[in-house]
Image (cartoon, helix red, strand yellow):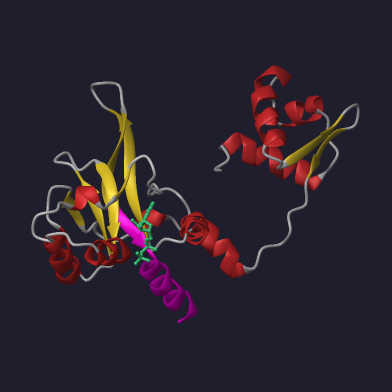
Amino acid sequence: MRLSERQLKIVELVKSSSPMTGEQIASKLKLTRATLRPDLAILTMTGVLEARPRVGYFYKEEKARSPIAEKMHQLRVGDFKSMAAAVKENISIYDAVVSMFTNNVGSLIVINEKRELRGMVSRKDILKATLGKIDLHQVPIGVIMTRMPNIIMVTSDESVLDAARKLVQHQIDTLPVVENYINEEGNEVYEVVGRFTKTNITNLFVELGG
Ligand code: ADP
């Protein structure tokens, strides 16, 4: 979560002299107590400050993060994502295999004509399909893909660490990077703007180490 400028000022104040009452913080910042109330509520709800009745606000000591952990929190997916290797759901499984080779990827993001996210097809989905007696030239990937709303995704402003956690937690290789908005029909849609993969993380790791 990003703190506002005023919230950062409050944190700095309380850090330098805990405990502080709401009135003390307000007078230091030359604001009214009422103006500060929403900020103090956010800071206590998110656990940055601790409020003790009749005593005041305390800064909750964070465990010191290592420099690399700090960096991982700061780096944003948008700065490290790749172009999306995206296909339409009516292409055949055979063409999906060709697309995986030409794009040098292990998973394809499936979109509609408006670039909205529809699903994902991975190597294993295709291998599984080849075990059955199906015509790879005829069957569209829409039949074998993992589809919305079961797709795990990220937005460009999420941290690289949060994205890496999603990859680990869901045991997947690729996250579509999306921008979400409400379309004319009032539905929430996810426009695909890239992909973020284990390879992006490996590259970043090498970059940080070099
Ligand atoms: P592989 O099949 O090469 O092991 P993954 O581990 O990425 O590749 O995929 C495992 C399964 O998860 C597949 O069935 C695939 O369709 C699905 N999958 C892949 N990416 C996602 C995602 N971002 N969200 C939800 N499911 C996914």
Q: Residue furthest left?
A: 137
Tell me if residue 39 is in the magenta stretch. Answer: no
Magenta region, mostly helix, strand or loop? helix
Point out the stretch of residues depicted in magenta: 194-210
| Position in image of residue 82 (x %, y %) | 28, 61
Q: Residue furthest front?
A: 133
Total count of labels: 0
Q: Quadrant of residue 10?
A: top right
Tell me if residue 209 is in the magenta stretch. Answer: yes
Quadrant of the image containing the C terminus = bottom left
19 lies left or right of 11: right
The vertical placement of 39 against 192, above or below, is above
> Viewer-proximal residue, 65 or 187?
187
Quadrant of the image containing the N terminus = top right
> Viewer-proximal residue, 137 or 184?
137
The vertical placement of 54 against 208, above or below, is above
Q: Quadrant of residue 104?
A: bottom left
Q: Residue furthest right?
A: 54
| Position in image of residue 194 (x %, y %) | 28, 54
| Position in image of residue 192 (x %, y %) | 26, 46
Residue at the image position 71 percent from the left and 62 percent from the top:
64
Residue at the image position 69 percent from the left and 17 percent from the top:
34
Ligand 1 - quadrant of the structure image: bottom left
> Viewer-proximal residue, 185 or 134?
134
55 lies left or right of 93: right
Residue at the image position 32 percent from the left and 32 percent from the top:
181
| Position in image of residue 101 (x %, y %) | 17, 71
Residue 80 in sight from this viewpoint: no
Residue at the image position 24 percent from the left and 40 percent from the top:
116
